[in-house]
Image (cartoon, grey):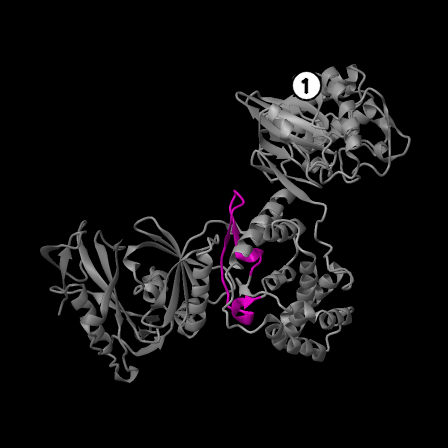
Amino acid sequence: MFELWDVLDISRNKTGRLHERGKPMNAGDCHLIVQVWIMNKDGEFLIQKRPGSKWETVGGCAVSGDDGLSAALRETKEELGVDLNPKNGQLFKQYSEPHINDAGTALFDIWVFRQDVDISTVVFQPDETCDAMWASKEKIKHMIDDGIFISEWYPYLDELFCYCDIHDIPGYASFVKIEPINKGLSSDKKYYIETTDGQRLLLRLSDIAEYERKATVYNMMKLAAEKNVSMCLPIDFGLCNDGINVYQLLTWCDGKDLETEITAFSDTEQYILGLNAGKILRKIHSVPAPDDMDNWHNRYLEVNDARLKSFINCGVQIDGSEAILRYYENNKQLLNDRPQCLHHGDFHTGNLLVTANLDLALIDWELLDYGNYADPWEEFNRIGNSKVVPHFTTGMIRGYFGGEPPADFWNLLAFYLSAGALMLVSWAFYIQKDCLEYSIQNANDVLRWFDNMQNPVPTWYLKDFYVQWVDGIPYKLKIPFDFSFLSKYGKVFKVFDNQGSGNICFGISNNESKYFVKFAGAPTENYSGKPENAIERLKMAVPAYRDLAHPNLIHLINDEEIGGGYAAVFEWVDAIYMYASDGDQSFTNLPLETHLTIYEEILDFHRHMANNGYCALDLYEDHIMWDSKKEKAVICDIDFYSKNWYEGMSGIWNTDCEWYPPEQFIDGAEIDEISCVYIMGATAFALFGNGRNRNVENWKLSNDLFRVAKQAVSDDRSQRQQSIEQLIAEWRAAKKC
């Protein structure tokens, strides 16, 4: 007997026409297909198998007179002999797909029924089904991987599994976007949520067995939120998935994982991030422990005396462990009368998110030792669980204390970190063998930090590092310095504080004008000399900027003694650097013709330099820029260009810099225009080759131009072009070939 379908329009309205199954459908004609997912109290799905086919769920075409629900009930009865209770069903999803073999369209209704079914009562229908079983989400995923489940019929499967988990969470109907988050070590399921009113949320699901622990963590988060801690704020907590799971609903925090991003930040930025992290931790610690809690001395030793005995008994040999054990025994009195407060439980860079503005947000609270109420300083123990970033960690300590910490802090930090290092070894030995090598290295690191427990101030702490602000911009110094005089030039918008020359530089705006101010005399962090030497060096450099004024040289406006030092004021250039410390590839990606223009303008400037009796030294990619608005190259630093010829000096130059001629590293060797020819050749290879790998395979221009550049970087001075003028002539001749 043939099967008849109701013909529907695309809006699922009946047209009043019927269609015989097996015949082609016309364009615009639609029919209904149902798929039925039956879920038990354990979160498993009842799946079935047809003879000679793979596993699937109940499904089929609606016949004339059916709606979605009646079709779902009928198909289940026909295929499995199971009577579903209509009250247990929910319409999960509707979507459409065009037919492959004709012009019709299939309209899908996906139904979820929560109903326990005794598998022994299933009745298999001849030519319909031959097997059935309950399968968890994980099992179905494995069956898909093994090729025994028809996944292509169910493109919504991940969405379905998520729906089953969370559909009974209050407010679910407002969730317009649900995306799984597959990051982190936690066994929790995590989802990014967007709602109809524009909220962005984080949803965490845990097994019901975790209820008490997760409830405690949620209440901890509420306490911290009351202290305005920057974090994912708690919104709701409860049971979902018919009591199978416990959920936490939190506000969403933007940002990237600080642990993976931190090395991309400058020293100053790392320090600022540390300051911010320390302030966050201080707020958490402002929540006091319950009044009836036992004293910290007893609570700590009750847990950790046994852990250290476990280390001794495990037999792992660590050179210096005796010093840690001795320090532990001799300093237990440090635990007396210590305050106790709320802990995050796992405070480190891996649980902090960072934005481009250096804002931080705390994530992933954990219920760990001591019920998360302990000595506030004990929470610094996570310093030893990952690679220490000195500027960040120094900043975190100072941010926490609002300056330098008290002396007692160092003694207790050494106590907690060293004892914790040995406990980590014991834990790895007995429980997590694959972490044993790391734990041993960590213990060795801790011993090195504290000089075998002889010095409680760790070696990574940057005592001579200081950050201050000007017009809201941070910069690093060794000690404070008064830069209030900069207001004479305008408002600071950029600081360059990483130079080893003793100078610190500022971008300053004054109405329509912008300036680049180079200042010597401050205690810059990367300079090993005396400030007065830096002042003298800058004074000596200034005449070169006047004598060598040129369209491709940064323009000097003024120089003066000011602020207890010396300042040179230049026009600001909005340009891109040949080398960008932040990894920006804008210069590298300039067209080849632009690189040719840059090189020829650099050559022209150095011919101008030679004609004025100057010698070049210390030119490299940091000193070359491209001004895209004016379409010209700009050389921004000629501080070591001089009218007097130089002698090479070993030990003062960076021997890893491929731009320097070999004679620069030989005591007493002459540095002259021929040396500058080498620098120009090195510039060519930096622009058109592969830097230090000066082979023709990496060369972007003609072989004739390669030979000119290769000759310029000869180690033998006599084999180089003997003047900048000769180099330019040969370059231009080769370019015409």
Q: Residue furthest left?
A: 16
Q: Which residue is mark 1?
A: 558
Looking at the rendered structure, the secondary structure element under dot 1 is: strand
Residue positioned 56% across, 25% down in the render: 509
Residue positioned 60% across, 70% down in the render: 296
Q: Residue furthest bottom?
A: 120
Under mark 1, the amino acid is Asn
- Residue 414 is drawn in which quadrant? bottom right
Residue 350 on the magenta span: yes
Vertical relation: 583 (above or below) 84: above
Asked if residue 606 can be seen in this view, the reply is: yes
Q: Is residue 127 left or right of residue 372?
A: left
Asked if residue 150 can be seen in this view, the reply is: no
Quadrant that contains the N terminus: bottom left
Viewer-side residue, 146 vs 194? 194
Residue 243 on the magenta span: no
Can you give x and y, in whole percent of width and height, for residue 162 in the image? 36, 63
**Highlighted magenta segment, given as a residue range:** 347-374
Can you give x and y, in whole percent of width and height, for residue 220 in the image? 46, 64
Vertical relation: 437 (above or below) 662: below
Residue positioned 84% across, 32% down in the render: 664
Q: Is residue 155 left or right of residue 670?
A: left
Q: Is residue 501 left or right of residue 162?
A: right
Vertical relation: 477 (above or below) 66: above
Can you give x and y, in whole percent of width and height, for residue 397 in the image? 63, 53
Viewer-side residue, 106 vs 312? 312
- Residue 438 is drawn in which quadrant? bottom right
- Residue 105 is drawn in which quadrant? bottom left
Q: Residues within 10 Å of mark 1 (few under 14, many from 20)?
A: few
Can you give x and y, in whole percent of width and height, for residue 709 in the image? 74, 28
Q: Is residue 43 left or right of residue 484?
A: left
